[in-house]
Image (tube, rainbow, N blue to C red):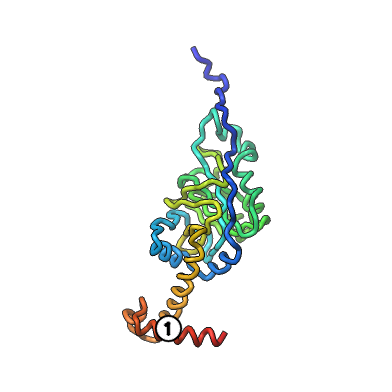
Amino acid sequence: MSDSSAPFPRPAFDLPVRGGAYQRADPDTLRELERVSAATACAKLHGMGISRSFVEGPRPLAEGQRIVGSAITLQFMPQREDLASGHGQEYVERHTALWHVLEQVQPGDVLVIQAFGSRYSGCIGDILARYFLRKGGVGIVVDGRIRDSDRIKDLGLPVWSTGTTPHYASQTDLFPWAYDVPVAVGGALCMPGDIVIADGDGPVIVPQAMAGSVVESAQDHEDWEVFSRLRLDEGARLSDYYPLTPDSREEYEQWRSVQAFAR
């Protein structure tokens, strides 16, 4: 008869897992994307052939939040008692990918967390959020939940999550497994170094190599939408100004020239 109290034989596998080296997004590109909404970025990527850039599920913790930053990634995986579990309570987490990824944070980073939409794993709490913010992190996107939500809100740290929970990170069936690896969040793939644009519509993942094209296309789009809003507010017909017709495009180009001269 087997002894159920005996320790599990442990596979020869080291945790946490860390992915390979990667380059963060260029700061100039991030600045250029500051003017681009999540909706515009998503639409432009769709036109370029990227059909799934929207992170479905996470919502902003507070109204009026907006971030643009370079993605660093954290992956939760199902617990398995012979490899990793939360049985040692939250103290075990200091040796996991959750602590390791926070030590890698640089100014302008967005932490993107794969947690399978878990309703019980509090992937980030107040203390970790404070540390992330002090190191220059600009926001967190969690395909799962957070804890200490009131304190995090008071910090002013922008967070998108699927909700809140009183649980700490490994108090349920997931465990902080890997960092600097590809993650799946809300049905979208995020690679380390990709760009995250998040606002009231939700987070969008912009592949780093396509960011320049998104900037070029989106700037014109955002500008003509400003022009169209002005004309519609003045009583113009929707079909003449949204989207632009050849005639209203010519009018827009003249308007834009005047705006550029005025600057």
Q: Is residue 140 left or right of residue 222?
A: right
Please identify the residue farthest to the top as the structure is shown: 1
Residue 154 appearing in the image? no
| Residue bearing mark 1 | 252
| Number of marks present in the image shown | 1
Could you say which is closer to the camera, residue 133 or residue 253? Answer: 253
Could you say which is closer to the camera, residue 165 or residue 223? Answer: 223
Please identify the residue farthest to the left as the structure is shown: 239
Could you say which is closer to the camera, residue 15 or residue 149? Answer: 15
Question: Which residue is painted at 54% across and 46% down in the image?
Answer: 181
Residue 260 at x, y percent in the picture: 53, 84
Residue 191 at x, y percent in the picture: 51, 51
Task: Give residue 250's quadrant in the image.
Answer: bottom left
- Above or below, comparing residue 10 to residue 142 in the picture: above
Name the image quarter holding the C terminus. Answer: bottom right
Residue 147 appearing in the image? yes
Residue 228 at x, y percent in the picture: 41, 80
Could you say which is closer to the camera, residue 119 or residue 256? Answer: 256
Q: Secondary structure at mark 1?
A: helix
Task: Give residue 244's quadrant in the image.
Answer: bottom left
- Above or below, comparing residue 201 to residue 13 in the picture: below
Residue 148 at x, y percent in the picture: 58, 50
The amino acid sitting under disc 1 is: Tyr
* Mark 1 burial class by Cα count in 10 Å: few <14, some 14-19, many 20+: many
